[in-house]
Amino acid sequence: MKKLLVTGGAGFIGANFVYHMLDTRPDVRLVCVDSLTYAGNMSTLARAMADSRFTFYRQDIRDRAGIDAIFDREKPDAVVNFAAESHVDRSIEDPALFLQTNVLGVQVMMDACRSHGNIRFHQVSTDEVYGDLPLDRPDMLFTESTPLHASSPYSASKAGADLLALAYHRTYALPVTVSRCSNNYGPYQFPEKLIPLMIANCLADKPLPVYGKGLNVRDWLYVEDHCKAIELILEKGRIGEVYNVGGHNEMRNIDIVKLICGELHKPESLITYVTDRKGHDLRYAIDPTKIRDELGWVPETAFADGIKSTVRWYLDNRPWWEEIVSGEYRDYYERMYANR
Ligand code: NAD
Ligand code: TYD
């Protein structure tokens, strides 16, 4: 049986990946490493913890000795690195933590892969490393050869990790792949991100804080489609390559927020325009031709269906996010949104 070490499995995409693999791949064992930052949640992993094919370690990826000990003990066949500080607004507040986890943590993971037999390593990255595209050039899309041009401390840290991963491949022949995905949505997303934040605020009849004029565009992908892309890259991706992942689903923020109001039968008068994010990227849009042509990946969930089931999930799983929004998240929200 193959053993896959997954970092950041208590977060949004990592947890969805854990369940995707447990539910569809009886031939795979999973070892999850997560330090449980504010974004990691053990209640998300409750069903996995009851599965004999799943093992969890509370462990920081920046801690070399701790990571080495887990590699010694578990001897994984491959590593997928989801662990990261992932929120742009927090990176504007505290860039140092982003560099430590998103760059130095990745270095620790890759060093462990090298010293334990040149283990296969996949880095989960983001389209944000390419910077942004103009709003009035729908013909322009990010390809894998678009120059890196990060705008925020978050995206700069992810770009740094991508470069380091590719350098480890070239210099040490570490078997590395990198995927750069567009914005994900779906179950278990932390309510600081646009879609779950708007759902939670709608349900509490709270103002819906739209940055700037709400005209920025993101390219949304259902999280399960991202998980399937990572599984494919792990198995069939060419070593040393980057794969863009996205589903040609560009939407303006304001249209997403109005759609959520509609789904929840809440008035659009809740929408409140607030001061824009510093350095706010205008538009992201992925060209997924390479992963489609080489690996046969295509997105399976239409946005109209994915957003309905995501809203349904937040309605059906209120205790999961209500516990989060009543905890230390309240201080974050106050800091980020009061007087904005
Ligand atoms: P998330 O913030 O929901 O989860 C991150 C997880 O990593 C948490 O469980 C947290 O506890 C863990 N973690 C953070 N620092 C750690 C450390 N030092 N050691 C061990 N664990 C640590 O993030 P997400 O949205 O699930 O994103 C996962 C990955 O996918 C990230 O690398 C992110 O850059 C990338 N990505 C995200 C999106 C998106 O739309 N969310 C899109 C493209 C790529
Ligand atoms: P976010 O979910 O933070 O993802 P990212 O910045 O990585 O794309 O934000 C998505 C978009 O929504 C982005 O353009 C910023 C905007 N946004 C708001 O307008 N209001 C909010 O409260 C949040 C969190 C985001």
Image (spheres, rainbow, N blue to C red):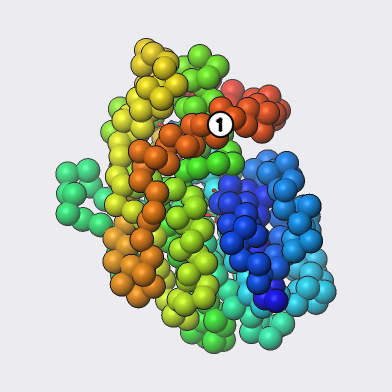
Image height check: is 105 above or below 216? below
Q: Quadrant of residue 320?
A: top right
Question: Quarter holding the N terminus?
Answer: bottom right
Q: Is residue 198 left or right of residue 33?
A: left
- Where residue 340 appears, as percent x and y from the top left, is 46, 22
Location of residue 268 (image quadrant): top left
Residue that appears at 49% across and 84% down:
170
Q: Residue at x 58, y 57 (%)?
A: 20
Residue 114 in picture, x, y percent from top left? 65, 82
* 146 to the left or right of 118: left
Decide: is 23 above or below 326.
Answer: below
286 or 148, which is in the foreground?
286
Q: Which residue is mark 1?
A: 314
Residue 299, quarter of the rendered image: bottom left
Q: Secondary structure at mark 1?
A: helix
Q: Nearer the viewer, residue 132 or 21?
A: 21
Question: For the residue marked with disc 1, what is the amino acid?
Answer: Tyr
Is 309 situated left or right of 321 in this image? left
- Can see residue 245? yes
The one of 1 and 206 positioned closer to us in this rendering: 1
Q: Position of residue 192 (x, y in %)?
A: 55, 34
For image coordinates 64% across by 43% down, the residue present is: 39
Picture residue at 47% right of the left edge, 37% below the top? 309
State the count of labels: 1
Residue 219: image location, x then y, percent: 34, 47
